[in-house]
Structure formats: structure tokens, C-alpha cells
Amino acid sequence: MHIHSRFSDGTETIGAIVERAMQLRLEVIAICDHFWPSIGSNQGGIGLIRERKEAIEAARADFPKIRVLNGAEIDIMPDGTFSQVAGGHEQFDHVIGSVHWGSDSSRWASAVIGASKRGVMHVLGHFDGYLSTYRQVDGEIVAASLAENEVAVELNSRYPPDNIGFFETAKDQGCRFTLGSDAHWLNGVGQTEEQAKLAEALKLPLWVPP
Ligand SMILES: [Zn+2]
Ligand SMILES: [Zn+2]
């Protein structure tokens, strides 16, 4: 549920990604590019985003057996707002909100809680990928806000989690979970085995967008 194409900082075309996912017998994938001014890409603008949407529609037509979500990974800013995207956040089927700046536990908590209330993101990406400290009390209030606002928690292969306690708290609060390879190249697509094992060990309920 988290793949980058060459429309941001990935190396592959959308057609190649979807073909690879078909070969792996995946049933649903989300292409989640970042767009400038999000940190992960210096590409953006309405023309690029339209071209990308057309590429996704073409791949859906070529590979009708797999569901391909038109997603985005959008930066959560320190004040709990989201980085802007040309054409708006609502145009995407699936939005991952991610923190891409180093922070401690309390700054992280206030940003993520603020973001979770905005009705923009469906998933919190790599929750501790940029965290210098983690306190369980902050994890508890973040998890409560995510659950209340129906934001899922991602298990991300590129940023294996250090703070497993957050997943357990999120599960207890009623959150759902997604698996994301965060693939930026072809052989990363579908590489979620380790995170799937962790989800199984912790009995985390996995969720796929309807
Ligand atoms: Zn990210
Ligand atoms: Zn990513």
C-alpha cells in the first residue's frame, strides 16, 4: 500500500510496477508518490499529476485483475498541517501522511494528532522513521487520535519500527494497520514479508481500503 514510481523519487514506470505486482499475485496496490514541495520529490504541478493519473488509468485498463489505487504520500508539517499538493489532497484514493523531519516524542505527537484531525490522511506512514525519542504516553494519545479519526497505522519495510509498543497501543485503541514496502525500485514491490510476520505476531488487524 506504499509504492513510489518515477513520478516522484522511484525508478519505475507505473506500468512496470503494476505488471510486477500482477506477477506477485498481489490483489491491490497503492502508488503513493510524493509531490513537490513534499520533501521526497522535486517534481510536482498539475500537469505532472494529471499525466500520472492517466498512467494509472492506463495500467488499470492493461491489468484489470489488480486494484491500483491512485495514492500520495504527503508530508505532515510540524504544526500539524499537510504539505500542499497541486490540485488538492482530495483527488487521491489513498493518502499516507508521513513525518519526514527529525523530532522528539512530544513534537511528533502534537504534529501527528493535529494532522489526524484534518480528514486528509488514511494512513500514518513509517510512524517512527524520524523519531529521536519515543515515550509511551505520547504514543497513547497519538493512537487514540488515529483511532478516533479512522487513520490506519503503517508497517513499513523501509523503516522497520523500533518502538513496537506503539503498535500494541494502537491495536488496543482500535486502530487498523496496513503493510507498505515503500518500494522505490522494481524488486522492492511486494516486499512486506517481515512486516507481515510482525503484524501476525502482534495480531494487528490489517486493512485494505474498500
Ligand atoms: Zn516517507
Ligand atoms: Zn514513501
Image (spheres, rainbow, N blue to C red):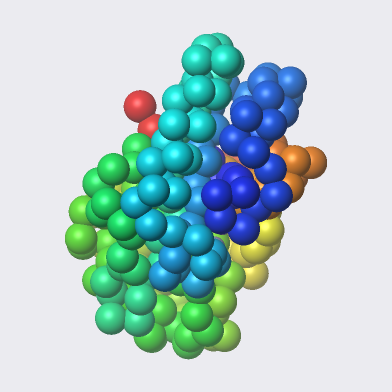
The front one of 24 and 148 is 24
> Would residue 116 be visible to someone looking at this image?
yes
Task: Give residue 116's position: percent from left, percent from top.
Answer: 28, 61
Q: Quadrant of residue 169?
A: bottom left
- Give the residue at x 50% y 71%: 39
- Give the residue at x 74% y 21%: 23
- Note whether 176 is above or below 209 in the view shown: below
Q: Give the position of the C terminus as an image quadrant.
A: top left
The front one of 77 and 123 is 77
- Give the residue at x 68% y 24%: 19
- Note whether 40 is above or below 31 in the view shown: below
Q: Determine the residue located farthest toward the top in the rendered image.
A: 65
Taking the image as four quarters, which one is ligand 1 found in? Answer: bottom right
> Would residue 123 be visible to someone looking at this image?
no
- Give the residue at x 38% y 41%: 50
The front one of 83 and 124 is 83
- Note whether 8 is above or below 84 in the view shown: above
Task: Give residue 137's position: percent from left, percent from top.
Answer: 39, 78
Task: Give residue 103's position: percent from left, percent from top.
Answer: 48, 85
